[in-house]
Image (tube, rainbow, N blue to C red):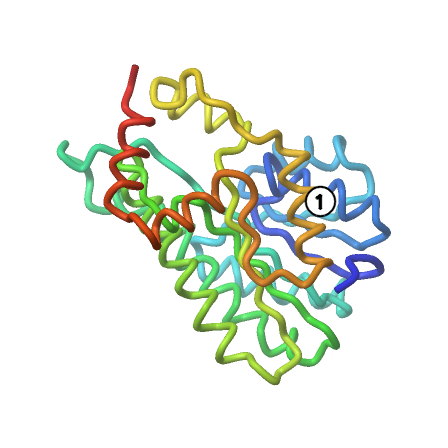
């Protein structure tokens, strides 16, 4: 599948992986649209990547998705690729008291958001030739990180969702790809998990984006760069060992 002359919508595209994907896909001659919750970040993204289109939208809000759908298709009826990238990852100790609404925020953004985006945009995508849905999960979909239990659970759910959706859409012309990044060198990786990731190497964001694009163009349905591939393998042959190893690696130094 060639990623050129396509119209691509990337949720959570104002920073990190989403913004770098937008940069590289724009350079390949695509029309690229990104979403974000923060208008200041949207403005900064448009300055950083001239030519990108942007909409303020929050995937955790069903009404915002409905509005986004109407606005995007009105301006970009050739939309044929949806990248479900928006997500939040928190260092969450469930052994502490937490507000019952706040504790599930990752579920609303990381899982409910993509499900709703797919449900809303799928009828249009089915009318487009060679349409594509890219769901961004994580290497933690295969082996959870105990410091981020809700995030890990949402990414395992995204892996499962991608498998089921791929089967359901067989024969429709819509391809479902899962991108499972390893640890990536973003501010979140170093700030929220500074103690857990001290001394660990992470994949540079440009490298991750390059591997993602190359994998899609090569026809891979499950793209697992770097350590993500090792985690998938270990989850099959030695799941208990893999979990203990990851827990030890991410224990605060």
Quarter of image, res 88: top left
Instruction: For mark 1, give the secondary structure.
Output: helix
In the rendered view, tell whether residue 41 sits above or below residue 100: above
* Residue nearest the observer in this picture, 191 or 185: 185
Quarter of image, res 134: bottom right
x, y (%) of residue 127? 69, 80
x, y (%) of residue 150? 29, 45
Residue that appears at 26% across and 37% down = 146
x, y (%) of residue 73? 70, 67
Residue at the extreme front of the image, as rendered: 237
Residue that appears at 39% across and 64% down = 160
x, y (%) of residue 100? 19, 45
Residue that appears at 33% across and 26% down = 249
**How many numbered discs?**
1
Q: Is disc 1 surrounded by few (<14), some (14 to 19) or many (20+) residues within 10 Å?
A: many
Screen quadrant of the C terminus: top left
Pointer 1: what residue?
22
Quarter of image, res 92: top left
């Amino acid at each position: 599948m060639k990623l050129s002359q396509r119209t691509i919508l990337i949720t959570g595209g104002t920073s990190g992986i989403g913004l770098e994907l937008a940069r590289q896909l724009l350079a390949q001659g695509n029309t690229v649209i990104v979403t974000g919750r923060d208008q200041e970040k949207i403005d900064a993204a448009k300055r950083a990547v001239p030519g990108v289109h942007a909409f303020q939208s929050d995937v955790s809000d069903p009404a915002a998705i409905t509005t986004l759908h109407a606005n995007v298709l009105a301006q970009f009826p050739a939309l044929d690729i949806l990248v479900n990238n928006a997500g939040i990852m928190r260092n969450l100790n469930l052994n502490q008291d937490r507000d019952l609404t706040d504790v599930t925020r990752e579920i609303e953004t990381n899982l409910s958001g993509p499900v709703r985006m797919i449900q809303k945009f799928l009828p249009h995508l089915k009318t487009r030739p060679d349409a594509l849905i890219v769901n961004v999960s994580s290497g933690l979909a295969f082996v959870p990180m105990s410091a981020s239990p809700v995030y890990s659970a949402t990414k395992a759910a995204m892996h499962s969702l991608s498998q089921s959706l791929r089967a359901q859409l067989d024969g429709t012309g819509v391809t479902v790809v899962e991108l499972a990044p390893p640890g990536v060198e973003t501010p979140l990786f170093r700030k929220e998990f500074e103690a857990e990731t001290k001394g660990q190497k992470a994949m540079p964001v440009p490298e991750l984006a390059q591997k993602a694009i190359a994998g899609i163009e090569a026809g891979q349905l499950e793209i697992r760069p770097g350590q993500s591939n090792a985690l998938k393998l270990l989850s099959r042959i030695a799941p208990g060992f893999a979990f203990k190893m990851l827990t030890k690696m991410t224990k605060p130094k």
